[in-house]
Amino acid sequence: MSRTPPYAAELRAALSHAVRGVDERELARATEALVARYRSVAPASAPILASRVHVAAYAAYRMPATHAALSRVLGYVADRGVAPRTLLDLGGGTGAAAWAAAGAFPSIQAITVLDQVEDALVLGRELVAHASAPALTDASFLRAVAGAWPDVEADLVTVSYVLSELDETAQAGLVSDAMRRGRAVVVVEPGTPDGYGRVLRVRDAFIGAGWTLVGPCPHVTECPLVQGDWCHFAARVNRSAEHRRLKGAELSYEDEKFSWVAAAAPGTLEPQASPGRILRHPLKRKGFVEFQVCRPDGTAGREVVSKKAGERYRAARDAEWGDPLP
Ligand SMILES: C[S@@+](CC[C@H](N)C(=O)[O-])C[C@H]1O[C@@H](n2cnc3c(N)ncnc32)[C@H](O)[C@@H]1O
């Protein structure tokens, strides 16, 4: 969880530059309002990012975390052999997925971010102006509303932290819009029971359409997690002094919990045996590492890798919650 994603420092510098002119009390008030709004999971009847200050607050307090979660997810997707040249980010807001994609995929050349909120797109453009990756500085941030996305196609479509703002019908519509436009689709949601529920419905849509699951699930049978449990992961985010002040927080880090699912259109990925997926922090003991995993046979449970396993044991010592089982 302590891996720092590529471009995290650059993004942080760009964020701190972008919010410099905004009144700190207004920013803190807008942050409080957003925290309260995102706690409730009712679909939004009007844009939640209602003003420039709300957008700045979102970027300052949420973007380092959504960027960290997306960097983890896109890193796994890259490891599975997905190497997109083009990215389309639906409901992309201030561009967290664009930054994460630039870090995860050396192949990326063109990025399009679509969102309904003009102020978010303006801030997104301001942020990438400070980036070093050409794919970021050249990224297009365009206004569009779900249900009326332009006909842009892309190797990869991302939908991150958007579904909770839509009702169930609109969520399904957004996912099929993403599948129509992309050769691979990644959906990320908060790592709550609710977010997991939405991710499960997306997973069903992928499987129903014959798409290949890229992750996190190593199988296409029913999710084995029992009632009361939910599949989620965590990415550690270091908090800047500004970030701590904004959130009234003392700890120098936070753990962003997220749920995700990714899939590729039929015929676009080389078939590959799926390893298990680590579902909890591994317990690293003397001479062995104990994991809770989701297995390729559709079951979930305990796996132990002992010192006798040699190379595999060394990989197990480095493995983290969310990684494939070595
Ligand atoms: C919580 S933010 C997530 C932003 C970004 N994807 C991220 O991961 O940081 C949700 C975004 O979805 C956008 N959104 C919500 N409903 C939308 C709609 N109907 N059409 C277009 N964008 C929408 C919002 O404007 C906002 O920027």
Image (cartoon, helix red, strand yellow):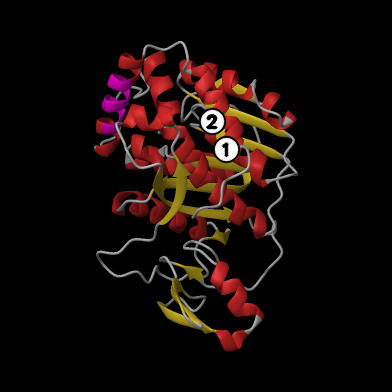
Foreground pick, 260 / 129: 129
Q: Is residue 128 left or right of residue 43?
A: right
For mark 2, does the 10 Å Cα neighbourhood hold few (<14), some (14 to 19), or many (20 or more) residues?
A: some
Residue 103 part of the magenta-drawn span = no
The magenta region covers: 28-35
State the residue position of label 1: 8
Q: Is residue 161 visible?
A: yes
Closer to us: 95 or 167: 95
Residue depicted at 30% across the width and 70% down the height:
226
Prevailing secondary structure class for the magenta stretch in the rendered image: helix
Q: Is residue 10 above or below residue 187?
A: above
**Residue placed at 35% from the left, 34% from the top?**
165
Decide: few, some or many residues near mark 1? Use Cα within 10 Å; few <14, some 14-19, many ≥20: many
Where's residue 291, x and y in %?
44, 75
The residue lying at 71 percent from left, 64 percent from top is: 270
Which SS class for mark 1? helix
- Cα distance in 3D space between marks 2 and 1: 6 Å
Q: Please state which amino acid type lies under the numbered disc 2.
A: Arg
Q: Amino acid at mark 1?
A: Ala
Say whether marks 2 and 1 touch (CB < 8 Å): yes
Residue behind mark 2: 12
Locate the C terminus by quadrant. Answer: bottom right
Horizontal and vertical percent position of residue 175: 48, 44
**Percent of width and height locating residue 70:** 53, 45
Measuring from the top left, give residue 225's x and y in whole percent.
Answer: 34, 69
- Ligand 1 found in image quarter: top left
Q: Say if residue 166 shows up in the picture.
A: no
Foreground residue, 293 or 212?
293
In the foreground, 311 or 43: 311
Q: Secondary structure at mark 2?
A: helix
